Image: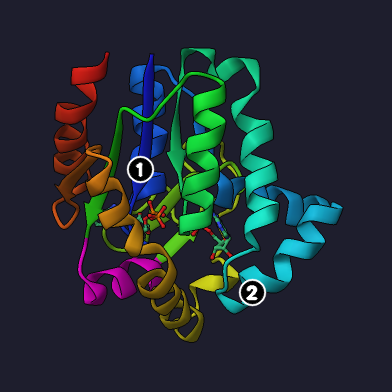
Amino acid sequence: MMNIALFGPPGAGKGTQAKELSKYYNIPHISTGDILRYNVREGTELGLEAKVYMDKGELVPDDVLIGLIRNRLTESDCDIGYLLDGYPRTIPQADALTDILDRINKPLDAVINIEVNDEELVKRLSGRRSCACGESYHIMFNPPEKEGICNACGAKLYQRDDDREDVIRQRLAVYNEKTKPLIEYYEDADVLVNVNGADDVDAVFKAICNTMDQFK
Ligand code: ADP
Ligand code: AMP
């Protein structure tokens, strides 16, 4: 059983790596951003509430996310472990996660912090193209085989509303204020592992595997 959280600022490469890691280790990829976007597309009550915050580059309120992650982690596919992507993002979310994981007896093995500088993050996010299936590409750094089309499912790629430059800046500010303190939080809990996220996708994948292999 592997119980892992991928951590890092928006654009660090969490989703890109999580997709591959989930296949490679055969554990469920739980992206709160993907779950929220699915709900926005479907027009559910959760989606309507979340969209207001997402469009502004703000975090969706903690009580919403805590309920969502509690439900997801108690689904049966998580019996063999999980790979969190984009959760937790605040101290209250991390405290709630510890509680949930204690209760289901699946404490975190590692929180993998993917480190990338702000200038590179802006470049990555402004060139990102996304697919509804959860894949993401970059027009220069990681282009799809066929322009504008998802390699994995063949659907048309789109640019996320929150990948506009002004919203990107806001998301990075929110990260620095609310999410970055979790680095110290998980350092203190002795589960933090730093990975250099500035390398290419394959090199970052290998660096993460070095850590995850210890928990196979
Ligand atoms: P996150 O899920 O952390 O917000 P993504 O995985 O969506 O980030 O990656 C953000 C953008 O950067 C995407 O366009 C992706 O294709 C690109 N990207 C991801 N990893 C790398 C990398 N190692 N080098 C260059 N570009 C990358
Ligand atoms: P992401 O796909 O991880 O970049 O998330 C996109 C957006 O979804 C964020 O900017 C937030 O508005 C919202 N979101 C995703 N995960 C969380 C979370 N754990 N807490 C609060 N908001 C979240």
Measured along the vertical axis of the image, is residue 63 above or below residue 29?
below
Please tell me the numbered disc located at residue 6.
Answer: 1
User: Dots 2 and 1: beta carbons under 8 Å?
Assistant: no
Question: Which quadrant, please, contains the C terminus?
Answer: top left
The secondary structure type at the circle numbered 2 is: helix
User: What residue is pinned by disc 2?
Assistant: 55
Establish whether ligand 2 lies closer than 8 Å to the Cβ of label 2: no
The secondary structure type at the circle numbered 1 is: strand
Residue at 19% x, 39% y is: 202
Q: What secondary structure predominates along the stretch shown in magenta?
A: helix
Q: Which residues are magenta?
A: 116-127
Q: Is residue 162 visible?
A: yes
Measured along the vertical axis of the image, is residue 61 above or below residue 58?
above
Q: Position of residue 52 (x, y in %)?
A: 72, 73
Residue 192 lies left or right of residue 73; in this view the side is left
Which amino acid, by three-letter code, is at mark 2?
Asp
Residue 85 lies left or right of residue 36; in this view the side is left
Ligand 1 falls in which quarter? Answer: bottom left
Q: Position of residue 82 (x, y in %)?
A: 46, 26
Residue at 75% x, 57% y is: 40
